[in-house]
Image: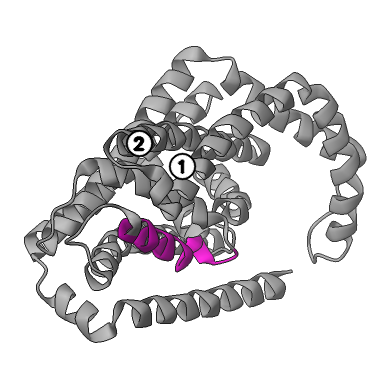
Amino acid sequence: MARENLRATILGFLGAFAVFALLFYFAGVDKLVDTLQMADYSIVALVVVATLAWLVAWSFALRTVLGVLGVELSLAKSFFVFSGAMFSNNITPFGQAGGEPVTAYLISRSADAEYETSLAAIASVDTLNFVPSITIALVGAAYYASEITLGTNRDLLLALVVVVVLAVTVPAAAYLAWQRRYRLESRAVSAFTPAVRTVAKYVPRVPVPTEEGIERRVNGFFRAIERIATNPRGLALALGASTFGWFCQMVGLWLAFRAIGVPIPLSVAMLVVPIGAIAGVTPLPGGAGGIETVLVALLLAAPLPAVTKSIAAAAVVVFRGAVYWVPTLLGGGVMGWISLRSSS
């Protein structure tokens, strides 16, 4: 299993490198390098500050959700745990979907919580983070609809259609899942029990769980989700922190353009950052390569005469360099420390 995961990660990074090579070739490597060399490094430092503010905000959201589930964690510890979560997401194909099991293990070890509770917490945070992203993107799209003729710009029109479809289908799917949660729980128990017992037979030093034990853990996961969903104060705090975190990311992209001397309206970042994040579901580690490509395409499609291919790519490199590498380096240190503590 570990060998298959390693192979998938290596293939994912090779795919990301290929996408980056095509993107940089499209932007013009020489022009891209020249633009980056002219960047104002004091403003680049502010992009890093915005990135840290985003991590603190979403760490607070995680801490809030864990508090609803009765798991106490300080904000400082939540920050490092969430950085570790971002590390696992950034090195795992399919982003959050691939990194959540590892993240849940990290939370359970750091907060001394049950694994199913930790998994419910990080799954809830990822879901809550999706809601404000779509709302903010709709606000940005509404701005563009009032300023330009979307029908004459296919890329922006397609982006708007994607946002509207997600804004309608995701809440509808969540509502249906909530209404049928007990049926889903029963099916999850039936589906996971034989799979988990089969895998456990081939994993050394791991006892084969009983059917009752698996059912108890699945039930615990669904009960934890239910506790979070029925806590209005916790939901409001987590959503507020998530919204602030998204705003910090948008400010980061806005600052990245100022760093290279080509300012853009903040409303542009409001539209492109949430849509670009959707590319994180690609089979690339943390969406690396896919997110950058989508961001550059959307920025070039926007009515920004001063934004050329090299400028768009340079600003995205500065922005994503901070958003991707700051939590990856911090989280890598956290994961290393957890591993050393476990081995000792």
**Image quadrant assignment for residue 116:** top right
Q: Amino acid at mark 2?
A: Ala
Residues marked 2 and 1 touching at CB (< 8 Å): yes
- Left or right position of 331 against 269: right
| Whether residue 45 is visible | no
Number of residue marks:
2
Q: Is residue 218 magenta?
A: no
For the point 65% across and 77% down, which residue is it? 7
Percent position of residue 151, x then y = 43, 45
Q: Residue at x 28, y 84 (%)?
A: 29
Is residue 105 rendered to the left or right of residue 316? Answer: right
On screen, 275 above or below 316?
A: above
Q: Which one is earlier in the sequence, the residue at label 2 or at label 1?
A: 2
Residue 327 x/y as whole percent: 36, 56
Check disc 1 and report its element: helix, strand or loop: helix
Q: Which quadrant of the figure contains the N terminus? A: bottom right
The answer to if 287 sits in the magenta stretch is: yes
Magenta span of residues: 283-300
| Residue pointed to by mark 2 | 145
Residue drawn at x 35%, y 42% as measured from the top left: 149
* Quadrant in the picture for residue 240: top left
Say whether residue 172 is left or right of residue 234: right
User: Dot 1 corresponds to which residue?
Assistant: 160
Q: Nearer the viewer, residue 256 or 95?
A: 256
Q: Secondary structure at mark 2?
A: helix
Residue 215 drawn at (x, y percent):
84, 34
Instruction: Please say if 20 is above or below 150.
Output: below
Marks 2/1: CA distance? 9 Å
Q: Residues within 10 Å of mark 1 (few under 14, many from 20)?
A: many
Three-letter amino acid code at disc 1?
Leu
Residue 343: x percent and y percent?
55, 64
